[in-house]
Image (cartoon, rainbow, N blue to C red):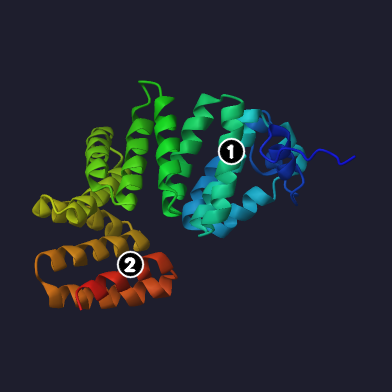
Amino acid sequence: MTAKKADPTSEEALIQSWLSARAGVSIRKVWPGENLDAAFEGFSRDALRHARVNPPESVRAVEKVTASDRKNLAPANRIKLVRLYAHALSHAGQLKASDRHYRRAWDLSVKLNLREQIVFTGLGWTNILSLLGHYEEAKRIGHYAMSRLKNSERVLKARLSNNLGVVYHRWGKFEQAVTLLKESRRQLKALGFRYDFAYVTYTLGHSLLLQGEDLRFARKCIEEGRAYFAENKLHTLDLYARTALALADLSDGHYRKAMETLEELHDDLEKLGDKRATALILRQQAEFL
């Protein structure tokens, strides 16, 4: 008689996949706290910070957590640990691996009906799904996460609106993108979140540009976003904004200026190893040669 295989998406299987991973650093030995879950708060803050400035370090930090710690964390923090790993992997450029771990975090969150974990996991996973071209699923996950928000969670609503706007932007559905991005931009401006506001402003400008609507305002938005990226040394986002401005130049008929910028950007993005953006540059060049 053949033994029945365990459901790979079950809570037990998902947790066991983490318990069996190679590990060795106890959270409480490095991060102070009254108990393991309190210490985990410090660990998660550091992991999130490292994800942006040093992705490999963030990935290693999560991988080194002991099996005992993983087993004894509260269920919500166990899910958060999986999500932290997915987040770190995304910053390290490992999008497919990130997608797998976001999916694990989502399955557990839904299975246990942990509203807050559903919202935060949906926020991150929506972006990864759209980067991988899974737009329908990104839309479904993002809207479901939005439906679980409380009225008081204005910051999360603004960020989810932004991420859903980005989904529609990447999907080529610019009218829906602009509607969501304008609402997110209004909310983020009122809340005073400069990075999020700059990012949504840049994306709104890019969507308006590709939609062929309000081109003067579109350029203003892209330039406003780029100014923040340059000021804060966000090199990759600055390159993306320069790409959008080159497209604006093409739309305005400034072909020579645009092509010179695109050639510079191609070299910069190739050095960065951003194959997706490099392909976009080549496509834009080809359209106007």
State which quadrant residue 187 falls in: top left
- Residue type marked 2: Leu
Q: Which mark is residue 280?
A: 2
Lower position in the chain sequence, tag 2 or tag 1: 1
Which quarter of the rendering shows the N terminus?
top right
Compared across the picture, whether 256 is left or right of 178 comes to left
Q: Which residue is mark 1?
A: 105
Q: Residue furthest front?
A: 1
State whether residue 233 is above or below residue 105.
below
Name which residue lies at 49% across and 55% down: 91
Name which residue lies at 50% across and 27% down: 116
Name which residue lies at 36% across and 66% down: 277
Element type where label 1 sits in the image: helix
Compared across the picture, whether 182 is left or right of 193 comes to left
Q: Residue 199, percent across and down?
A: 30, 49
State which quadrant residue 8 falls in: top right
State whether residue 100 is above or below residue 251.
above
Compared across the picture, whether 26 is left or right of 138 comes to right
- Residue type marked 1: Ala
Q: Residue 215, percent across and down?
A: 11, 54
State which quadrant residue 270 falls in: bottom left
Q: Residue 49, percent across and down?
A: 49, 48
Q: CA distance from mark 2 to mark 1?
A: 32 Å
> Nearer the viewer's eye, disc 2 or disc 1?
2
